[in-house]
Image (cartoon, grey):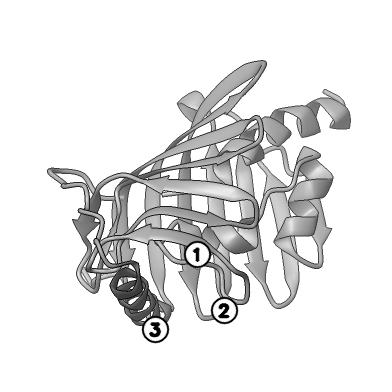
Amino acid sequence: MTECHHLFGFRRLMLAGLALLGLSGCAALPPVAEDPIEARAAFAERSVALEAVTQWRLAGRLTLELPAETWTGQVGWRADASGQVIDLSGPMGRGGGRLMLGGHQAVLVTRDGERYEATDADTLMARITGRAIPVSGLAYWVRGMARPGAGFDLRADRDGRPARLIQDGWEIVYGAFEDAGVEAMPASLELHREDMRLRLLIQRWQLGPAPIS
């Protein structure tokens, strides 16, 4: 199998996977606050609380829709003070790989053992997929936060949970939120930009260190 073929398959996987995703059970859609100033203040307070949680992980399902194709797969994302690791796999465990972020370096290792590196994740994803995949923003959006240092448009409820967030040319629409201990976290979200749409169903969230068994 040629390197070009490997990149084509992984390109589709990374386009789908780098936007991510856990809890199951009953959930309710957040009511949007009538006062936008109150909502933005609550959103900022919620973001500060989540920013303090340096260790978190999620697992979920994702679907990528492009004009000529649709792809579905699994994603696992974990983060701590040293960096982040994103694991992706296609149906029946086929394809995929691991993206490791930290120390001003982004490294991608495919299941076939191929290795790709760049100084940051956004540059690496653009090189592999041929599209602008804002991994730096996704790490915040998946938690229901805005990327620091960039403007954004927001609709949120009185508890600061976003219903819609627009930032960096992406529109992120949130579904239900579920209790994850420190804060309620997104159970589903959809990202849209131009001809690309990503639907994310989060099956499990963990905020803070894993419990000792």
Identified by mark 3, the residue type is: Ala
Residue 30, image x, y percentages: 22, 53
> Which residue occupies 41% across, 74% down?
55
Give 164 or 12, whichever is nearer the viewer.
Answer: 164
| Labels 2 & 1 near each other (Cβ < 8 A) | no
Give 137 or 203, whichever is nearer the viewer.
Answer: 137
Classify mark 1: residues with Cα within 10 Å, few (<14), some (14-19) or many (20+): some
User: Horizontal placement of 119 versus 208: left or right?
Assistant: right
Q: Real-space Cα distance between discs 2 and 3?
A: 14 Å
Residue 105, image x, y percentages: 75, 69
Q: Quick one: SS at disc 1?
A: helix
* Lower sequence index among marks 1 and 3: 3
* Lower sequence index among marks 2 and 3: 3
Classify mark 3: residues with Cα within 10 Å, few (<14), some (14-19) or many (20+): few
Q: Is residue 187 depicted above or below 12 in this figure?
A: below
**Label 1: which residue?**
140
What mark, if any, has residue 82 been given in the picture?
A: 2
> Which residue occupies 49% across, 25% down?
91
Which quadrant of the structure image shows residue 5?
top right
Name the front one of labels 2 and 3. Answer: 3
Identified by mark 2, the residue type is: Ser
Classify mark 2: residues with Cα within 10 Å, few (<14), some (14-19) or many (20+): few
Identified by mark 1, the residue type is: Tyr
**Label 3: which residue?**
52
Residue 210, image x, y percentages: 30, 70
> Which residue occupies 74% across, 49% down?
125
> Which residue occupies 76% across, 41% down?
131
Q: Quick one: SS at disc 3?
A: loop
